[in-house]
Image (cartoon, rainbow, N blue to C red):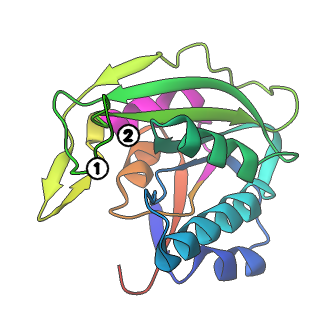
């Protein structure tokens, strides 16, 4: 069973009393320096941090980020002191899907950072492959997470009968992957999504 609750994840987490067996999310990333992008980055950092506080000890949190060191370091720093970064996998896209360009870099990959809260419980990440190659699913001008990538993110960390959270649920693809892996799943998404 999966469910998406509507509202800002920080507000929803403030009322949350449950602890989660796994947290996985593909939050929005920002690439610029405008005021709205700074606000988005701050909301993502606070949302991730508050979500991590609801993760059971010994369990895993997987956060996707842009492949730049800046974005990866941002995600790691947002979660410092609550969960520890353990591994990074990469979702490789067969071709560039964004207009964001820098010299010598075309943004055709996404990092998947595996964090752990405390020492590992019975869930290990040994089945987490270092990479997957898969094209994104286009939905209008936006790209959605493909089912194959969602399964790659969720299945190595799934806890049968456990509860998974996606604080930035978007289309709900990670929630469906959790359901397929035998977990109940809760997602948060803003009202306008």
Secondary structure at badge 2 equals helix
| Residue at the image position 17 percent from the left and 27 percent from the top | 94
Q: Quadrant of the C terminus?
A: bottom left
| Residue at the image position 43 percent from the left and 26 percent from the top | 90
**CA neighbours of label 2 inside 10 A, class few (<14), some (14 to 19), many (20+):** many
- The residue carrying mark 2 is 150
Residue 162, visible in the rendered structure: no
- Judged from this view, the residue extending furthest toward the front is 103
Task: Answer with left or right where residue 63 lies relative to residue 123.
Answer: left
Question: Residue 157, how many percent across, how many down?
Answer: 59, 31
Question: Residue 32, how many percent across, how many down?
Answer: 44, 61
**CA neighbours of label 1 inside 10 A, class few (<14), some (14 to 19), many (20+):** few
| Residue at the image position 57 percent from the left and 80 percent from the top | 8
Residue 142, visible in the rendered structure: yes
| Residue at the image position 48 percent from the left and 78 percent from the top | 36
Q: Which mark is residue 72?
A: none
Query: Which of these two is toward me, 165 or 130?
Result: 130
Q: CA distance from mark 1 to mark 2?
A: 24 Å
Q: Indicate yes or no whether the magenta region holds residue 154.
A: yes
Question: Residue 190, how many percent across, how many down?
Answer: 46, 80
Q: Which mark is residue 100?
A: 1
In which quadrant of the rendered view does residue 46 lie?
A: bottom right
Task: Answer with left or right where residue 104 lies relative to residue 13.
Answer: left
Position of residue 89 relative to residue 72, above or below, is above
Q: Are marks 1 and 2 in contact (CB under 8 Å)?
A: no
Q: In the rendered structure, which disc, 1 or 2, sits on the residue that comes first in sequence?
A: 1
Q: Which residues are magenta?
A: 149-164
């Amino acid at each position: 069973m999966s469910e998406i609750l509507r509202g800002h994840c920080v507000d929803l987490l403030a009322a949350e009393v449950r602890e989660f067996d796994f947290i996985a999310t593909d939050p929005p990333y920002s690439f610029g320096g405008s005021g709205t992008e700074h606000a988005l980055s701050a909301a993502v950092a606070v949302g991730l941090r508050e979500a991590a506080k609801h993760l059971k000890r010994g369990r895993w949190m997987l956060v996707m980020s842009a492949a730049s060191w800046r974005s990866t370091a941002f995600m790691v720093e947002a979660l410092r002191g609550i969960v520890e970064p353990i591994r990074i996998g990469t979702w490789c896209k067969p071709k560039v899907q964004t207009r964001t360009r820098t010299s010598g870099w075309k943004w055709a990959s996404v990092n998947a950072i595996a964090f752990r809260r405390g020492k590992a419980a019975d869930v290990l990440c040994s089945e987490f492959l270092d990479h997957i190659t898969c094209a994104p699913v286009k939905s209008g001008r936006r790209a959605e997470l493909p089912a194959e990538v969602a399964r790659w993110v969720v299945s190595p960390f799934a806890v049968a009968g456990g509860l998974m959270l996606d604080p930035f649920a978007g289309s709900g693809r990670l929630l469906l992957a959790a359901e397929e892996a035998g977990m109940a799943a809760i997602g948060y998404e803003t009202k306008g999504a």
